[in-house]
Image (spheres, grey):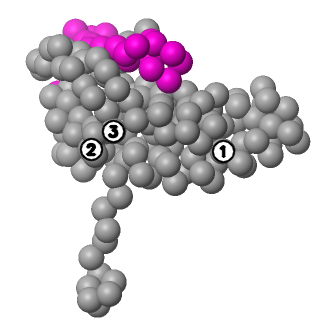
Amino acid sequence: MADGTNERVKTSLLDQRTIEARIVGPLVEAFRFEFGEEKTLEVLRRVVADLARQSGADLARRLGEASLTAFASTLQVWTEGEALEVNVLEQTDERFDFNVKRCRYAEMYRELGLEKLGSSLSCLRDFALVEGFNPRIELTRTQTIMEGADHCDFRFRRVEQEDGEDQH
């Protein structure tokens, strides 16, 4: 950079998603016009889910483990820069439950006029990310701020393998 070092500037996840949205939003609109909304959104969701699944697998490799406790330890990545205001309800080896009270991701998509794409570009990632991280962690979420709720309800559970052994 200016001082000649190779130091990388760290970009928050919210900033990264903003940059992506400014590029992807107009592309999606152009593809919608050319190919129709249904097909465009189907392809978009598939690509975003695949990318998130790979990110989850990469995250597990970087952490050196794929436990629910390790996953929970990464919450600060998503909340960095006050991107999310979170109320943790329960955090154990078996469960990780929290509510998001404010989502600046949703605010950003609305500000860019992309509120209809926000769920596909952001919320959809959560399920695929955890699947890639560890398929034995299950996410349940019944509502999101992006879709108009007053909070998002994230409920992660460690599920046992079919042979009776649990994950570690």
Residue 9 drawn above or below residue 127: below
Report the quarter where the N terminus lies: bottom left
Residue sitting farthest toward the front = 111
**The quadrant where residue 103 appears:** top left
Q: In what element is the residue under mark 2?
A: helix
**Picture coordinates of residue 67, whole percent (x, y):** 19, 30
Discs 2, 1 touching: Cβ within 8 Å? no
Q: Nearer the viewer, residue 165 or 111?
A: 111
Which region shows up in magenta?
143-168
- Indicate left or right for 141 with 27 as reference: left
N-term mark: 3 or 1: 1
Q: Secondary structure at mark 1?
A: helix
Label 2 vs label 3: CA separation?
A: 6 Å
The percent coordinates of residue 76 (x first, y second) are 22, 40
- Tell me whether circle 2 and circle 3 mark residues in contact (CB < 8 Å): yes
**Residue assigned mark 2:** 80
Q: Where 4 sits versus 53, above or below?
A: below
Residue that appears at 28% across and 46% down: 81
Name the residue that disc number 3 marks.
83
Question: The residue under label 1 is which amino acid type?
Answer: Gly
Give the x, y percent position of residue 143: 44, 12
Split into 4 quadrants, where in the image is the C terminus? Answer: top left
Q: Please name the amino acid that badge 3 sits on.
A: Ala
Q: Main secondary structure of the magenta part?
A: loop
Q: Provide the residue designation for mark 1.
A: 25
Q: Relative to the observer, which residue lies in front, 89 or 167? A: 89
Q: In the image, 92: left or right of 9?
A: left
Instruction: Estimate how packed mark 1 is, as few (under 14), some (14 to 19) or many (20 or more) residues with alpha carbons within 10 Å.
Output: some
Marks 2 and 1 sit apart, C-alpha to C-alpha, by 23 Å
Q: Residues within 10 Å of mark 2 (few under 14, many from 20)?
A: few
Q: Who comes first in sequence, dot 2 or dot 1?
A: 1
The residue located at (31%, 62%) in the rendering is: 10
